[in-house]
Amino acid sequence: MNTFGQLFRVTTFGESHGPAIGCVIDGCPPGIAIAPEEFRHDLDRRATGKTRHTSARHEADEVEILSGVYEGRTTGTPIALLVRNTDARSKDYDKIAAQFRPGHADYTYWQKFGHRDPRGGGRSSARETTMRVAAAVIAKKWLLEKSGVRVRGHLAQIGEVVPQAHDWNTLDWSVVEANPFFWPDATQVVELENYMDALRKSGDSVGARVTVVADGVPPGWGEPVYGKLDAELAAAMMSINAVKGVEIGDGFASIAQRGTLHRDEMTRDGFQSNHAGGILGGISTGQQVVCSVAFKPTSSLRLPARGMDVEGNEVDIVTTGRHDPCVGIRATPICEAMLALVLMDQALRHRGQCADVGEVSPRVPGSIRVGGP
Amino acid sequence: MNTFGQLFRVTTFGESHGPAIGCVIDGCPPGIAIAPEEFRHDLDRRATGKTRHTSARHEADEVEILSGVYEGRTTGTPIALLVRNTDARSKDYDKIAAQFRPGHADYTYWQKFGHRDPRGGGRSSARETTMRVAAAVIAKKWLLEKSGVRVRGHLAQIGEVVPQAHDWNTLDWSVVEANPFFWPDATQVVELENYMDALRKSGDSVGARVTVVADGVPPGWGEPVYGKLDAELAAAMMSINAVKGVEIGDGFASIAQRGTLHRDEMTRDGFQSNHAGGILGGISTGQQVVCSVAFKPTSSLRLPARGMDVEGNEVDIVTTGRHDPCVGIRATPICEAMLALVLMDQALRHRGQCADVGEVSPRVPGSIRVGGP
Amino acid sequence: MNTFGQLFRVTTFGESHGPAIGCVIDGCPPGIAIAPEEFRHDLDRRATGKTRHTSARHEADEVEILSGVYEGRTTGTPIALLVRNTDARSKDYDKIAAQFRPGHADYTYWQKFGHRDPRGGGRSSARETTMRVAAAVIAKKWLLEKSGVRVRGHLAQIGEVVPQAHDWNTLDWSVVEANPFFWPDATQVVELENYMDALRKSGDSVGARVTVVADGVPPGWGEPVYGKLDAELAAAMMSINAVKGVEIGDGFASIAQRGTLHRDEMTRDGFQSNHAGGILGGISTGQQVVCSVAFKPTSSLRLPARGMDVEGNEVDIVTTGRHDPCVGIRATPICEAMLALVLMDQALRHRGQCADVGEVSPRVPGSIRVGGP
Amino acid sequence: MNTFGQLFRVTTFGESHGPAIGCVIDGCPPGIAIAPEEFRHDLDRRATGKTRHTSARHEADEVEILSGVYEGRTTGTPIALLVRNTDARSKDYDKIAAQFRPGHADYTYWQKFGHRDPRGGGRSSARETTMRVAAAVIAKKWLLEKSGVRVRGHLAQIGEVVPQAHDWNTLDWSVVEANPFFWPDATQVVELENYMDALRKSGDSVGARVTVVADGVPPGWGEPVYGKLDAELAAAMMSINAVKGVEIGDGFASIAQRGTLHRDEMTRDGFQSNHAGGILGGISTGQQVVCSVAFKPTSSLRLPARGMDVEGNEVDIVTTGRHDPCVGIRATPICEAMLALVLMDQALRHRGQCADVGEVSPRVPGSIRVGGP
C-alpha cells in the first residue's frame, strides 16, 4: 500500500540510500501547467541541511519529470517524478545493519519481511516524504487555481514551547515563512534558536506539533462514513513518519468542553466559531479546515540506548548518522502536502458523484478559526 | 465510500429512521462458526436505553443473517447482516427537517447532496455504527481464535473527570464491564453517576475519551507508508461520529517528551516501555496496541442555539429528540469494533503478502503498557 | 470481491436458496427519482418461469428499498435493495450436496473454501445476477436522462442458429422485446420455438450469443491502460455466469481482416464504419458501443454425467432441479446491466478527472454499426 | 487507472517518445531473488527490431532497479523499474500531430483530455506493455518457484493462417520459441515468412490470435462473482493495445456446443476434457488455464486513409513511422505477462482469505487441454 488516494492517486517508491526516490501521480486532471522548477520551493522548505537545526544531509532534490507532462501541461496520464539520491552515506549505517534501533522500524520490518534494507532506514526513512511534497505541489496549484483553496501550515509547539497567546484569525503567514521553525510568532525565534542549540548539545531530541489549515474549501467536500474528510486527513497525517496523534479542530480539548460551547452556531453573518475545524459529518462546512499533528521526538540519538541485535544479543545502540533533533520542524510542508492531497482527491470524487448538484443556497459564510493550535 | 477494509471489507447501509440498517462483510475467511445470538453481547454494550445516562431510544437490534453462513459456519462469500429499525420516532424530527442543527451534518449533507433524509440525522446518525459493532463480532472471534488477539476498551475521561492514577498494566477489565461508563476505576462510579445526573439536568453535554487496546498482536501486522497500522487506526477512529482526535501510544504527550524517554528500549527480557503504543514504522511490535480517541460533546441539546433554515433565515434550534448527554460513553464498543476491523484486515493482508516469511527469531517479548490513558 | 465499480459501486450478496439476495449501491449521484416499481420491467425480462423455454422456478422478485432513497429520490448515500427468496426448493439439491456436478462451481468452491452452501449452487447461482439487473435500473435511468445514453441488447445466436442477414443499423428493437428469445428477426421465432422444444425434449442444452449496444455514448468515456472501457466491459461480461468469451466490435473476426478494412475512416460526415465497436485506446469514440458475449451450454442436465463425490468416489450425476436449456436467453438483460454499470461508473470517473475539459470540437459524428452480431 | 492488481499491484508510467517508461510493483512478497539481467529474456522476446517482421524501432530496454531490492532480493517494499527511451524518432510523427489517425487513440485522447502527447502515440503506444512484461518476470518466477505454475503462450492464427491440426496436449514449446512467430508448428514457418513478406510489401496489415496457457495452477485460485479469475483475465487481456476479443477455454465455440459435450466430466483418473479452460465459477479447477486473445490489424499504414485534423478538415492520413504489419506477433509475451500478473495477484489474495483452508482432498487430477487454440 504505497498508493494514496482514490482518484488522484500518488504512488511513491524508493529507499533512503537507494539509487533514487520517486512517485507516480495517476488520475491528475489534464491541462495543468507545471514545470520542473515549480517543485523547488516546497522541496527546499522540507529539505535538510539548510540550518543547523536539521540533519546535515544535503540532497539536491532535482526533480525529473519522466512522463505525463507534454509541452508544459499535464496530459491526464501518469506523471512520474524522479529524484536521484546523491548524498547517501551508507557507511554511516553499516555498523548497525544487524541491530534494531529502539524507536525505529528496524525490528518491525525485520519481523514482517524477514529481509530489509537497513541503509538509512531504507523505506521507513522520512526521505520518502520528499515525494509527497513534490506530488502535492501539483495538487496545491490546482486547488488554488480551480477552487481558491490555499493550504498552509506552521509549527505550534516544540518540546514544551508554545506560541505566545494571540489571535489565530490574524496569523501573519509571512512570519511563519521567515524563520527556520515555521513559527508563527517572530518574538520567540531567538528563544527557539537557543532552545534548539541546547538540545543539540545535550544529544537529546524533542517532539513538535504542526498545525495545517486550508482556507477557501467550499462546503461539500468529503464523504459520509468511511471516506470522511477528517478520517482521510487522520490517515494521511498518521502515515507520516513519527506522527503519534491527529486532531481536527479543537481535538482532545473537546472532551472537557460543553456542547453549548462546542457546537458552532450559525447566523446570517456566518459561523460564529469553528470548534469543529471546518468539518461536520465528515464533510467540509465552508470554514477553515484545521488539523493539528503530534510528532514524537526522534529516537536516533548519539546517547546510547539498550537494544537488541538480529541474533538476540543485547547491545548498546548509538546513532552516529545525521539526524534532526526535532523531526517535527521540517514536517510542516509534509503535513501541508498531505492536506493538499486529501483535498484534491476529495474534490475530484465530489464532482464525480455530485457534479449534478448546483450550488445550494444559502451558503453560510465562514472561516472563523477559534482556539489555539 | 461506505466500505471499510481491503481484504476484510465491511459495507454498511441504512438511515437512522429508515426501514433497516445492515452491512455486507466481504472477504471473510471460510469456516468461522457464527450464530445470530453471538452478536447480542456487543450490540447490547453499544445500545441506548439501558441506563438513564444514554438516549431513551430502545432498539431490539435483532440481527438477521441473510447470506454467507451455511450450517453455522462462514462460507467465504459475502455475509449480509440486517437489523430492522423498530423505535424510529420520526415525528420528533419533523419540525427541524428544514433547519440546520449547529454541530450536525445537516448543513454539510445539504450542501453536498442537495437532497437529504433529515429523520434522526439520516445516514449521519450514530445508528450506523451498530453494524460496525456487528461486523466486528466476527473479526474479534477470528482474531482471538486464530492469533490470540484480544481487543478491549474503556473510558478514560468524561468531561473533566479522569481515572484515579493507577497502574495500567494491572487494569481489571471486569471492573470496566461492571459499570455503565466502561470506567476502569470502581471507586469513581458514584461520582460519575452524580456528574452525569447533574449534566442531564443542566441540559448540556460533555465529551469523552475512549482508550482501546489489543493484546496479543504479533509483530509484523501493518504496512509501510500509506497502509500503516496506525494510519488505518486513525482513519477508522476518526470515521466514528463525533470523534475529533486520535492518539497512538503517548500521542500528543510525546511532543514534550525527550527522545531518551520516548524510545522504548529493548532487552532480552523484552521491551522496557511502550510509549509507541505497540507500533513502529506502521507495523506492530508485538506489544500491546494502544489507541486513544477524543469524542466531542453532542450538539443535540434542549438548550436553544442560533442556527439557520434552508431558506436562509436565522432560527433558534432546540432539539427535543432522545439524545445522549455524553455520546462517548457508548462509543467504547464502537472503538473496539474499529480496532478489530483494522487488525483483521491487516492480518489477512499480511499473510497474503508475507505468508512465506517464517517466524523470524528472536522475538522481543513485549506488552508493557506505560503512561496514562 | 463482490463489489463492482470504482465510483458507482455495486456490492451484491445472497445465495440461490438462502433467505434473500440483495445489493448495496454506493456512490450514486443524489437526486435521481426512483420507485420500487421501476425495477419490475427489467427483473421480469430476466426472470425464469415466464415461458417454457426457461427454468420453471418462479420468483416474485419484489424489491424492497432499505436505504438511500428519501421521498422518492436518491440521497447520495448507499442504496440497499433486498429481494426475498420465495421459491427455493432446496430438497431438489439435497441428494447432490456431497457431489461435484461437472461443469459447475461445486468442486472449485469446495477446494477454495472447504465449506460451501450447495443449495441451488449457493453463491455461484445465476440468481445473483438479479441484483445486477436491479442496480442497473438506476444506472440506465441516469445514463438516459443525463447523457442520452440508451443501453439495449439482443440474442445473436442460439446453438447453431443465427439471425438472417440484415442491416444492423436498422435493427427494430420492438421486435427484440416482442419474443421470448430477445431475437432481432421476427421471421425466425417459430423456428426457434421448435428448436428449443426439441432441445428440451432431448434433455440437452446449447449456448448462445448476446450482443449489447449503447447508443449515445459521448466521446471520452474510459481510461487509458488498465481502466480501459473495453477492459472493464470484458471483465463485467466475463463475470456473468456461463460466459466464455467477449468481443468488442468485430472481435475475433478482426484477426483475418486487413488494416485497410478494419480502421474506421473519418470524414466530415462522420465515421465511415464501426469495426472498432465504438472504442479506441480504451476510450469511447462517440459511436455505438458494441459488445458480444458467448454463453456456454448449461451443464445441469437430466442426462447423466460422470462425476465425483466429496469422498473421491466416481458417481453418475443427474440434475433433476429446474434449469434453463439455454441460459443465454435470459442473459440479455444481465449483459445490458453490466454494460450500464460500466458506463455509469466510467461517466462519473470521467467527470471526476476531466470535468474541466470543455467539449473539444470538432466532434466527428458517428454511430454506424457494421458487421454481424 | 494505471495500476493493475489488488495485492500484487503494478503501476506503469511513460510515453512512447518521452524520456522513459517504468513501473512500480507494490505488494511483492519479500525474499524473491531478482537481478537486472533476468528481465532480458522476456523483454527481448517482446522487442521490436529483431526480425524484418516487426517494427524497425530498436530499444535497448535496459532495466534499472531503483528500489525494493536489496542485496539481490526483494524487500517487500515497492520495486521501481526504469527503462530509458533511446530510439524515439519523434520527427516521424510531427506532421501528424494535428491529425487523428483512423483506428488510433488520437481522437479519443483528444476528446477526453483536451491535451495529448502525439509523439509515437504517447501513452497509448504499445511501448507501455514493456513494463508489463518486466513486472511479470518477477511474477513468473515466484509462481514457478512457489507453486510450480508455468505460464507460456504461442500464436494460434495470423490473418487467415492457422496451425495445422495437431494434438494440443503434446505441444512442443521449443518449437514456439525457435521461430519469430511464436508459432507452434515448425512446418509452417516458411509459409508464414512468405505470407508476412507479401503483406509488408502490400503495405497492409493483419490481425492475429494469441493463446496463453498456465500449467500447474492449483484448484482454488480466483474469487466468486466480480473477482472471478476469468473476469480478471478478460480485463487483463482486453487492456492490451489492439485486443478486440478474449476467450476462456472453448470460448465462442461453446455457443454451438451441447451441454453433454461441453461439461468436463470427472473421474478418479481426472478430468476427461477441458472445454472450460481450467476455470469454473471463476475459480481454477487444477487443470490447464487456457485463454485466447484476438488482435486487430494495426491501423498505422503507409496506404492512405481518410481522416480528420483537429480543426475539422478532412485529410489523407499516411503513416510513415516504423510499425508492425502484425502487432499480434510480438504480443505473445505480453499476453503471458498479463496471465502471470493475474495469477500472482489471485494467489496472494487466495492465501490472504483462505490460508486457513488446508488442502481439501480428494483432488481431481487434471490438465487435459482439448480443442483448438
Image (cartoon, coloured by chain):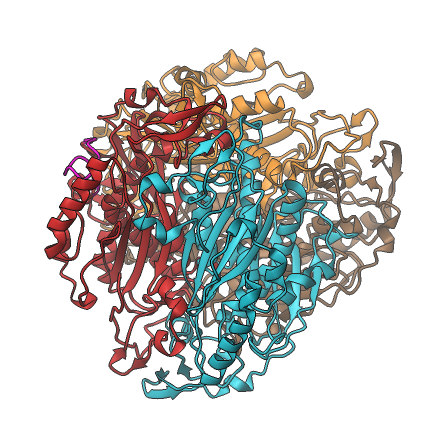
Chain colours: A brown, B orange, C red, D cyan
Above-or-below relation of D328 to A236: below
Residue C197 in the figure: left or right of residue B337 = left
Question: Is D58 on the left or on the right of D273, as rendered?
Answer: right
Q: Name which residue lies at 64% across and 17% down.
A: B171
Front-lying residue, B260 or D69: D69
Residue B48 screen position, x and y as percent: 37, 20
> Observer-nearest residue: B355 or B160?
B355
Residue A356 can be seen, yes or no: yes
Q: Is residue A3 visible?
A: no
**Which span is picked out in magenta?**
C46-59
Q: Residue at x 42, y 44 (%)?
A: D276
Q: Can residue A336 be found in the magenta stretch?
A: no
The vertical placement of B125 against B169, above or below, is below
Quarter residue B284 falls in: top right
x, y percent for residue A266: 34, 46
Which corner quadrant of the image does residue B365 belong to?
Answer: top right
Q: Is residue A243 above or below residue D198?
A: above
Which residue is at a point 61% across and 37% down the rendered structure image? B350
For the stretch drawn in magenta, the main secondary structure is loop
Residue closest to the eye, B349 or C28:
B349
Judged left or right of residue B188, residue C124 is left
Question: Which quadrant of the structure image shows residue D22?
Answer: bottom right
Estimate the x, y position of residue C141 in percent, counting from the top left.
Answer: 22, 52
Answer left or right for C96 relative to B335. Answer: left
> How many tags in the picture?
0
Q: Nearer the viewer, residue D41 or A53?
A: D41
Point out residue C2 in the picture as x, y percentages from the top left corner. Answer: 40, 40
